[in-house]
Amino acid sequence: MKNKQILLFLFLLLCGASFAQNKEALSSAKVINTTNAKAHLSFLASDALRGREAGTADGDKAAQYIADYYKKIGVKGAVDGDYLQRVNATRIHLSQSLQVMGSPYQPVIDFFNMPSSISLPGFQLQTDSILFAGYGVIDDGIQSYNDFQEQSVTGKVVMLIGSGPRDGAFNFQDKVKYLAFHKAKALLMIEPVVDHKSDGLMQHLFNEQMLLEGSAELSSIEKMSQNMPIIYIGQQVADALLKSANTDLATVRKKLVESNKPYPFVFKTDLKASASRTFEAVHPANVLGWIPGSDPILKDEVVLLSAHYDHLGINPYSVGDSINNGADDNGSGTTGVLMMADAFMQAVKAGKGPKRSILLMAATGEEKGLLGSSWYISHPVVPLNKIISNLNVDMIGRTDTLPHPDHNYIYIIGADRLSSDLDAIIKKTNATYTKLELDERFNVRNDPFQLYFRSDHYNFAKQGIPVTFFFSGFHADYHKASDEIGKIDFDILCKRTQLIYYTAWELANRATKPVVDKKVE
């Protein structure tokens, strides 16, 4: 019994020692300071970069700044000695129109077309009748239910309410497949997002779409819809159409809810619509830096630090300031990664470099659907099975409106989804160095924002790589031109970056890598 107690004491002592404050880590972390943070972010979030949109010259300027800085501090290029990993992508531009009873409606303001449902070279749609079929459900998985009843959809323009109480077992794709198989002429989907856009930014985003070269997304939807136009409409267009049937959207919604029964009907109207799409090849870049490990064995294992540097560019629909500077989203995270790169290089120059290698990824196209990290997964410059963990930084420069004791907090998301080790390492590191409030309210399966799936770390999590998403929360300037550098809290930005750096230091230098002991979600 005594021997067991001694062994337990030694084990706890060793565990505590591995997390004692490391003087080399503390010394190298001195470059993570407000002076350096302001220098980086003053450029990245400046009007000169015009919002750093992926696939533009402005986005390329940001990429080159990051590459030049890596070169300046001695970080190696990870792409055959270079820093830029070019991504092959296609930008889709739309031209679209819609009229009801001769009255024109505004693209994206009142309606928008699903880009991938527009057959080439485009479509011209005209009809004098429409089939309204409730939610478009034919099997709710609970009881025999059919919103179409005996109504045939062949050759008809079909109008559906976008979502309803029976959608669980019969989703959007099921509806599209059903209508396309039965040769419907077009689908009008009543979609609340058309009526609830916060500002002109959504207009800009819905007018274009960007896809990776070889992406299955476009081709799969094209095959699914079989060139059947899918047009999202808001309440204004829906009411204009239903007026011909002497009703409106609120009335038919109420009838469906109160009766709990299908309510299909055909009504006469006059609808004209057209759309076309053009393609533009674009080649934004991931910026990949490499710090080789110092240990002859452990150097083959890699810690990945990532942050997307792209933002939303210029909003042509904006009144007043049209530049989406993205100081917090994600100039703050990019700034954090640049300072962490500098800190690791300080350790290298002092002869105390990390035992494992560090891969630094400033990702492009996150705002377009995690495109840069998706491209990396398909075109890795460091094999995915060598990456032991990904620490992803997206928005760490502000304080949100949710309750916290003070601004000394950070949301951690996903740390325990694949590895109990990684979660424990972060918490112990925080207790040892930074003592931030580690808020996990978004790290739940029923998170309404589903943040675990919404930034670049998720592409690595899908490969079974333990990840953590560091995030400081939403604020009133999220995805708006008002996300400016003047609103950044540089002190807390640096403190949060220090937590991530010390965590990366521990991952890079500990004897064992985090054990993956949970299944991929």
Image (spheres, rainbow, N blue to C red):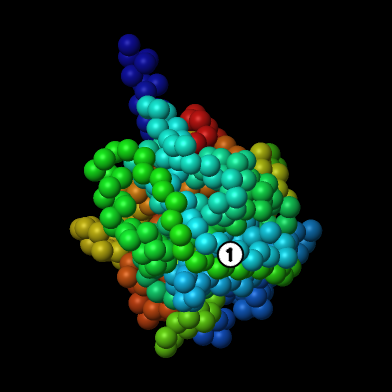
Q: Would residue 36 be visible to someone looking at this image?
A: no
Q: Is residue 198 above or below residue 378?
A: below
User: What type is the residue that disc 1 sits on?
Assistant: Gln
Q: Position of residue 488 (x, y in %)?
A: 37, 74
Q: Position of residue 371 (x, y in %)?
A: 62, 57
Furthest residue toward right: 80
Q: Nearer the viewer, residue 379 or 339?
A: 379
Name the residue: 56% across, 86% down: 48
Q: Is residue 406 above or below residue 460?
A: below
Determine which residue is flagged by label 1.
126
Q: Position of residue 497 (x, y in %)?
A: 44, 61
Name the residue: 68% across, 59% down: 119
Q: Secondary structure at mark 1?
A: strand
Q: Is residue 146 left or right of residue 294?
A: left
Quadrant containing the N terminus is top left
Q: Is residue 331 above or below residue 391?
A: below
How many numbered circles does the render carry? 1
Q: Nearer the viewer, residue 267 or 308?
A: 267
Q: Is residue 450 above or below residue 188?
A: above
Q: Would residue 198 be visible to someone looking at this image?
A: yes
Occupied quadrant, residue 114:
bottom right
Furthest residue toward bottom: 320
Name the residue: 36% across, 64% down: 243
Q: Nearer the viewer, residue 298 or 321?
A: 321
Occupied quadrant, residue 118:
bottom right
Name the residue: 40% across, 45% down: 264
Neighbours of disc 1 within 10 Å: few (<14), some (14-19), many (20+): some
Q: Position of residue 485 (x, y in %)?
A: 41, 79
Q: Nearer the viewer, residue 299 or 364?
A: 364
Q: Is residue 259 left or right of residue 518?
A: left
